[in-house]
Amino acid sequence: MARRMAPKSQIPKDADPESLFGMLRPFLEWLRVRGYAERTVENRESYACFFAAWCEERGITRPQEVTRALIEQYQRHLYHLRKKDGKPMSFQSQHTRLLPVRAYFKWLTRQNHILYNPASEMEMPKMEKRLPKHILTPHEAEAVLSQPDVKDPFGIRDRAMLEVLYSTGIRRMEVVNLGLYDLDEERGTLMVRQGKGKKDRMVPIGERAIAWIQKYLFEVRPRLTVGVDCGYLFLTKDGESFSPGRLTQLVREYVDEAEVGKTGSCHLFRHTVATLMLENGADIRYIQQMLGHAELSTTEIYTQVSIRKLKEIHTLTHPAGREAYLKPVAHPELIAELEEENQEEEETLIP
């Protein structure tokens, strides 16, 4: 598979090697040597350069000049910073911008470029466990899937990509990086290579999604291949792989055209897959494996989202919600467990 061209560096070409900008070059090289994903390296460069530019505006150009007070001032700057729409950055976004700065100064200290680490006592913003803004219903998801014009070759390609997102719940970058031979039609699986954390995993994929991929492979992809085949499954009209931003825009446009009253893009399908599978009885650990979450706690957010299922169970089982009084049936194990919990709570009240 062809290697993507490296993005243009944000570090000024004429940067002093001993400056905040200049020292970033060996830092980024250090990350690459230790196997960090290129996407991670790019993000750290971007946010570290943002910090370096902010410092430069205040006459601070070298790592030795950065103090703990300056770091705290930068944190306050991020807190008060407003986006283009006038809204403040989320604590998640602030955390994302501060993490590369902390890593950068930790590296500078360990490499003896500075005597002490001004970011060592940086208190990171508390991470929010935010629920997904929107979740599609099955009917709404089908409405989005039906938007591409499948009479057009690009419509067939787009439908295949939407089907992959809805069937597997894989990430945007994982769709972009799918290889030509990552689909196993006989087993009904899709190989996700070097996903988040540089981990491979096998995920199930539905028959309908497979059918659309096959239609795309036989009828459309050969027309898009220009010169040497780059090896990626989904290609642009120029025969190249999709960029993450381009895929996001394409999916967002189809969601908007469906007029379901909800907004989102690739991750909207990921949230939808997890929530609907959970509501339909899938074990959360299987969903964890399918989504590629390293920690179960990351997947557990969807247990909060599936309130519809919880409401159904509440209506069916809560005594106040029943139309007629039903004599409760004692469950020995449950009664014993509740009694044990009650005993533990009472013991905690004893001085």
Image: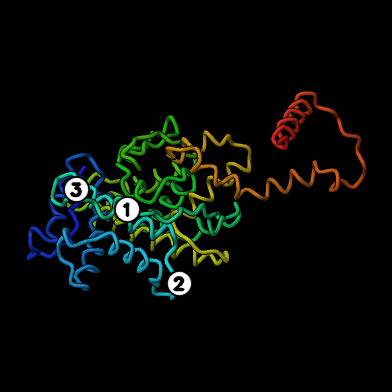
Label 2: how many Cα within 10 Å (few below 14, some 14–19, many 20+): few
Q: Are marks 3 and 2 in contact (CB under 8 Å)?
A: no
- Counting from the top left corner in percent of width and height, residue 330 is at 84, 28
Who comes first in sequence, dot 2 or dot 1? 2
Of labels 3 and 1, the one closer to you: 3
Asked if one can make out residue 150 in the rendered structure from this viewpoint, the answer is no
User: Identity of the amino acid at label 2?
Assistant: Lys
Residue occupying the point 60% across, 50% down? 305
- The picture quadrant where one finds residue 81 is bottom left
Residue indicated by mark 2: 87
Label 3: how many Cα within 10 Å (few below 14, some 14–19, many 20+): some
Who comes first in sequence, dot 3 or dot 2? 2
312 vs 149, nearest the viewer:
312
Residue indicated by mark 1: 99
Of labels 2 and 1, the one closer to you: 1
- The residue lying furthest to the top in this view is 332
Q: Which colour scheme is used?
A: rainbow
Who comes first in sequence, dot 3 or dot 1? 1
- Counting from the top left corner in percent of width and height, residue 87 is at 45, 72
Query: Is label 3 in a helix, a strand or a loop?
Result: helix
Of labels 3 and 2, the one closer to you: 3
Mark pair 3, 2: CA separation: 35 Å
114 vs 177, nearest the viewer:
114
Residue indicated by mark 3: 109
Q: Do the residues labelled 2 and 1 touch (CB within 8 Å)?
A: no
